[in-house]
Image (tube, rainbow, N blue to C red):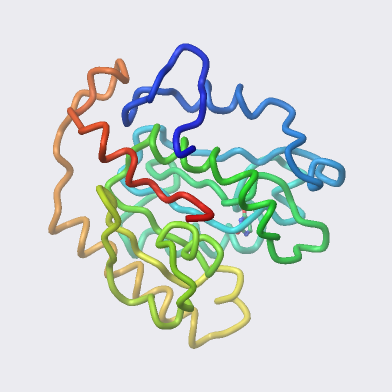
Amino acid sequence: MGVMRIPGHEHQAPREVSLEEIRSVLGDCRLCELAQTRTNIVFGVGNPHARVMFVGEAPGRNEDLQGEPFVGRAGENLNAILSLAGLSRDEIYIANVLKCRPPGNRDPKADEVLACSPFLREQIRSIWPDVIVTLGNPATHFILKTEVGITRLRGRFHQTGHFTVMPTFHPAAALRNPAWQELLEADFRMLGDWLARHPAVKTPQAPAQASAPVARGEAEALPRVGE
Ligand code: URA
Protein backbone atom coordinates (compact mmCIF):
# COMPACT_ATOMS: atom_id res chain seq x y z
CA MET A 1 0.00 0.00 0.00
CA GLY A 2 1.10 3.59 0.34
CA VAL A 3 2.26 4.18 -3.20
CA MET A 4 -0.32 4.00 -5.97
CA ARG A 5 0.58 2.19 -9.16
CA ILE A 6 1.01 4.79 -11.88
CA PRO A 7 1.84 3.48 -15.36
CA GLY A 8 5.46 4.17 -16.25
CA HIS A 9 6.55 4.67 -12.63
CA GLU A 10 7.75 2.40 -9.88
CA HIS A 11 7.93 3.64 -6.27
CA GLN A 12 7.58 7.20 -7.50
CA ALA A 13 9.70 9.83 -5.82
CA PRO A 14 8.32 13.24 -4.84
CA ARG A 15 7.53 15.43 -7.89
CA GLU A 16 8.18 12.52 -10.24
CA VAL A 17 4.59 11.96 -11.37
CA SER A 18 2.55 14.73 -12.96
CA LEU A 19 -0.94 15.68 -11.83
CA GLU A 20 -2.16 14.77 -15.33
CA GLU A 21 -0.88 11.22 -14.87
CA ILE A 22 -2.71 10.94 -11.54
CA ARG A 23 -5.88 12.36 -13.09
CA SER A 24 -5.68 9.82 -15.83
CA VAL A 25 -5.42 6.93 -13.33
CA LEU A 26 -8.52 8.33 -11.59
CA GLY A 27 -10.32 8.23 -14.95
CA ASP A 28 -14.07 7.79 -14.59
CA CYS A 29 -13.61 6.44 -11.06
CA ARG A 30 -16.22 3.96 -9.76
CA LEU A 31 -14.43 2.98 -6.56
CA CYS A 32 -17.27 4.08 -4.25
CA GLU A 33 -20.98 4.75 -4.35
CA LEU A 34 -20.50 8.51 -4.82
CA ALA A 35 -19.87 7.76 -8.51
CA GLN A 36 -23.60 7.13 -8.88
CA THR A 37 -24.70 10.56 -7.72
CA ARG A 38 -21.90 12.92 -8.78
CA THR A 39 -22.12 15.23 -11.77
CA ASN A 40 -18.37 15.78 -12.10
CA ILE A 41 -15.23 14.45 -10.48
CA VAL A 42 -13.54 17.38 -8.73
CA PHE A 43 -9.87 16.50 -8.97
CA GLY A 44 -8.16 19.71 -7.85
CA VAL A 45 -6.95 22.97 -9.28
CA GLY A 46 -4.02 25.33 -9.10
CA ASN A 47 -0.30 25.59 -9.38
CA PRO A 48 1.35 22.17 -9.75
CA HIS A 49 4.47 23.63 -8.08
CA ALA A 50 2.59 25.32 -5.24
CA ARG A 51 4.45 26.01 -2.03
CA VAL A 52 1.16 25.90 -0.17
CA MET A 53 -1.45 23.24 -0.80
CA PHE A 54 -4.96 23.48 0.65
CA VAL A 55 -6.96 20.37 1.43
CA GLY A 56 -10.72 20.53 1.91
CA GLU A 57 -13.31 17.90 2.69
CA ALA A 58 -15.38 17.17 -0.40
CA PRO A 59 -17.04 19.02 -3.26
CA GLY A 60 -20.31 20.80 -2.54
CA ARG A 61 -23.13 21.45 -5.00
CA ASN A 62 -21.39 24.19 -6.98
CA GLU A 63 -18.14 22.27 -7.12
CA ASP A 64 -19.96 19.16 -8.32
CA LEU A 65 -21.63 21.16 -11.07
CA GLN A 66 -18.48 22.98 -12.19
CA GLY A 67 -15.88 20.26 -11.58
CA GLU A 68 -13.65 22.63 -9.59
CA PRO A 69 -13.00 22.84 -5.84
CA PHE A 70 -14.01 25.81 -3.71
CA VAL A 71 -16.05 27.75 -6.25
CA GLY A 72 -19.12 28.26 -4.03
CA ARG A 73 -19.55 30.40 -0.92
CA ALA A 74 -16.77 28.59 0.94
CA GLY A 75 -14.50 29.32 -2.01
CA GLU A 76 -15.45 32.99 -1.97
CA ASN A 77 -14.51 33.14 1.69
CA LEU A 78 -11.23 31.36 0.99
CA ASN A 79 -10.42 33.76 -1.86
CA ALA A 80 -11.19 36.74 0.35
CA ILE A 81 -8.79 35.73 3.12
CA LEU A 82 -5.92 34.33 1.04
CA SER A 83 -4.35 37.78 0.85
CA LEU A 84 -4.00 37.75 4.66
CA ALA A 85 -1.36 35.08 4.06
CA GLY A 86 0.11 37.04 1.15
CA LEU A 87 -1.19 34.41 -1.27
CA SER A 88 -3.26 34.49 -4.42
CA ARG A 89 -5.41 31.71 -5.79
CA ASP A 90 -3.15 31.14 -8.81
CA GLU A 91 -0.09 30.34 -6.70
CA ILE A 92 -1.74 27.70 -4.50
CA TYR A 93 -3.13 24.25 -5.21
CA ILE A 94 -6.47 23.08 -3.80
CA ALA A 95 -7.84 19.57 -3.58
CA ASN A 96 -10.29 17.69 -1.40
CA VAL A 97 -10.10 14.42 0.51
CA LEU A 98 -13.07 13.21 -1.56
CA LYS A 99 -13.22 13.90 -5.27
CA CYS A 100 -16.98 13.43 -5.53
CA ARG A 101 -19.83 15.18 -3.74
CA PRO A 102 -21.54 13.27 -0.95
CA PRO A 103 -25.31 13.62 -1.50
CA GLY A 104 -26.73 16.52 0.50
CA ASN A 105 -23.18 17.40 1.59
CA ARG A 106 -23.23 14.70 4.25
CA ASP A 107 -19.97 13.80 6.01
CA PRO A 108 -17.57 11.54 4.11
CA LYS A 109 -17.88 7.86 5.05
CA ALA A 110 -14.79 5.93 6.11
CA ASP A 111 -14.94 3.61 3.10
CA GLU A 112 -15.16 6.61 0.76
CA VAL A 113 -12.09 8.20 2.35
CA LEU A 114 -10.29 4.87 2.10
CA ALA A 115 -11.12 4.54 -1.60
CA CYS A 116 -10.41 8.14 -2.57
CA SER A 117 -7.51 9.27 -0.41
CA PRO A 118 -4.76 7.48 -2.39
CA PHE A 119 -5.40 10.04 -5.12
CA LEU A 120 -4.92 12.92 -2.68
CA ARG A 121 -1.79 11.25 -1.37
CA GLU A 122 -0.38 11.10 -4.91
CA GLN A 123 -1.36 14.72 -5.55
CA ILE A 124 0.58 15.72 -2.44
CA ARG A 125 3.56 13.62 -3.54
CA SER A 126 3.41 15.21 -7.00
CA ILE A 127 3.23 18.81 -5.75
CA TRP A 128 5.42 18.23 -2.68
CA PRO A 129 4.45 21.55 -1.07
CA ASP A 130 6.20 23.07 1.92
CA VAL A 131 2.93 23.72 3.72
CA ILE A 132 -0.36 21.84 3.74
CA VAL A 133 -3.33 23.82 5.05
CA THR A 134 -6.07 21.47 6.17
CA LEU A 135 -9.53 23.00 6.17
CA GLY A 136 -11.80 21.42 8.77
CA ASN A 137 -11.83 18.12 10.58
CA PRO A 138 -11.89 15.44 7.83
CA ALA A 139 -8.88 16.94 6.01
CA THR A 140 -7.02 17.51 9.27
CA HIS A 141 -7.71 14.01 10.55
CA PHE A 142 -6.52 12.49 7.30
CA ILE A 143 -3.30 14.49 7.07
CA LEU A 144 -2.33 14.46 10.75
CA LYS A 145 -3.61 10.94 11.44
CA THR A 146 -5.44 12.07 14.55
CA GLU A 147 -8.99 12.27 15.79
CA VAL A 148 -8.32 15.41 17.84
CA GLY A 149 -10.78 18.17 16.94
CA ILE A 150 -9.86 21.22 14.89
CA THR A 151 -10.45 23.69 17.73
CA ARG A 152 -7.62 22.07 19.67
CA LEU A 153 -5.27 21.68 16.71
CA ARG A 154 -5.61 25.06 15.00
CA GLY A 155 -3.53 28.13 15.83
CA ARG A 156 -0.16 26.42 15.46
CA PHE A 157 1.91 24.48 12.97
CA HIS A 158 2.40 20.72 13.02
CA GLN A 159 5.10 18.70 11.28
CA THR A 160 4.46 15.44 9.50
CA GLY A 161 7.51 14.15 7.64
CA HIS A 162 8.54 16.76 5.07
CA PHE A 163 5.36 18.80 5.50
CA THR A 164 4.51 21.70 7.75
CA VAL A 165 0.78 21.44 8.38
CA MET A 166 -1.54 24.24 9.40
CA PRO A 167 -4.95 22.96 10.45
CA THR A 168 -7.69 25.56 10.52
CA PHE A 169 -11.44 25.95 10.37
CA HIS A 170 -13.28 25.13 7.18
CA PRO A 171 -14.23 28.40 5.42
CA ALA A 172 -17.84 27.19 5.10
CA ALA A 173 -18.11 26.51 8.85
CA ALA A 174 -16.52 29.89 9.60
CA LEU A 175 -19.22 31.62 7.57
CA ARG A 176 -21.74 30.31 10.09
CA ASN A 177 -19.68 31.27 13.14
CA PRO A 178 -18.13 34.76 13.35
CA ALA A 179 -15.77 33.71 16.17
CA TRP A 180 -14.38 30.93 13.97
CA GLN A 181 -14.05 33.35 11.06
CA GLU A 182 -11.85 35.56 13.25
CA LEU A 183 -9.69 32.60 14.20
CA LEU A 184 -9.52 31.44 10.58
CA GLU A 185 -8.27 34.88 9.59
CA ALA A 186 -5.75 34.88 12.44
CA ASP A 187 -4.46 31.52 11.19
CA PHE A 188 -4.04 32.88 7.67
CA ARG A 189 -2.02 35.82 9.05
CA MET A 190 0.09 33.31 10.98
CA LEU A 191 0.65 31.44 7.70
CA GLY A 192 1.74 34.67 6.03
CA ASP A 193 4.27 35.25 8.82
CA TRP A 194 5.58 31.70 8.48
CA LEU A 195 6.01 32.06 4.71
CA ALA A 196 7.85 35.35 5.17
CA ARG A 197 10.17 33.75 7.72
CA HIS A 198 10.79 30.70 5.51
CA PRO A 199 11.60 32.00 2.02
CA ALA A 200 11.20 29.46 -0.75
CA VAL A 201 14.32 27.52 -1.61
CA LYS A 202 14.76 27.91 -5.36
CA THR A 203 14.67 24.54 -7.04
CA PRO A 204 14.41 23.79 -10.75
CA GLN A 205 10.80 22.75 -11.31
CA ALA A 206 10.80 21.44 -14.84
CA PRO A 207 11.27 18.77 -15.87
CA ALA A 208 9.78 17.21 -12.76
CA GLN A 209 12.67 14.78 -12.37
CA ALA A 210 15.06 17.72 -11.97
CA SER A 211 13.42 18.95 -8.75
CA ALA A 212 15.14 19.08 -5.38
CA PRO A 213 16.62 15.79 -4.29
CA VAL A 214 14.33 14.23 -1.71
CA ALA A 215 14.83 10.87 -0.15
CA ARG A 216 12.36 8.25 -1.34
CA GLY A 217 11.80 7.32 2.25
CA GLU A 218 10.39 10.75 2.91
CA ALA A 219 7.65 10.17 0.40
CA GLU A 220 6.61 7.19 2.47
CA ALA A 221 5.86 9.57 5.36
CA LEU A 222 2.74 10.65 3.49
CA PRO A 223 -0.46 10.02 5.39
CA ARG A 224 -2.01 6.62 4.92
CA VAL A 225 -5.52 5.85 5.96
CA GLY A 226 -6.25 2.80 8.02
CA GLU A 227 -2.92 2.75 9.83
N1 URA B 1 -16.05 22.43 0.73
C1 URA B 1 -14.97 21.64 0.57
O1 URA B 1 -14.47 21.03 1.50
N2 URA B 1 -14.47 21.53 -0.65
C2 URA B 1 -14.95 22.17 -1.70
O2 URA B 1 -14.41 22.02 -2.79
C3 URA B 1 -16.05 23.02 -1.51
C4 URA B 1 -16.59 23.13 -0.28
Residue at the (53%, 27%) spot, across then down: 22
Residue at the (55%, 76%) spot, across then down: 174
Residue lying furthest right: 36
In the image: residue 110, left or right of residue 12: right
Residue lying furthest bottom: 179
Residue at the (32%, 27%) spot, across then down: 13
In the image: residue 132, left or right of residue 32: left
How many numbered discs, if any?
0
Question: Where's residue 86, x and y in %?
Answer: 30, 56
Residue 119's place in the image compared with 212, above or below, is below
In the image: residue 119, left or right of residue 35: left
Q: Residue 115, located in which quarter of the rendered image? A: top right
Residue at the (58%, 60%) spot, across then down: 76
Question: Where's residue 121, x and y in %?
Answer: 47, 42
In the image: residue 126, left or right of residue 156: right
Q: Quadrant of ligand 1?
A: bottom right
Question: Where's residue 200, x and y in %?
Answer: 17, 43
90 or 47: which is nearer to us? 47
16 or 197: which is nearer to us? 16
154 or 196: which is nearer to us? 154
Q: Residue 218, located in which quarter of the rendered image? A: top left
Question: Where's residue 206, x and y in %?
Answer: 29, 18
Residue 72's place in the image compared with 150, above or below, is above
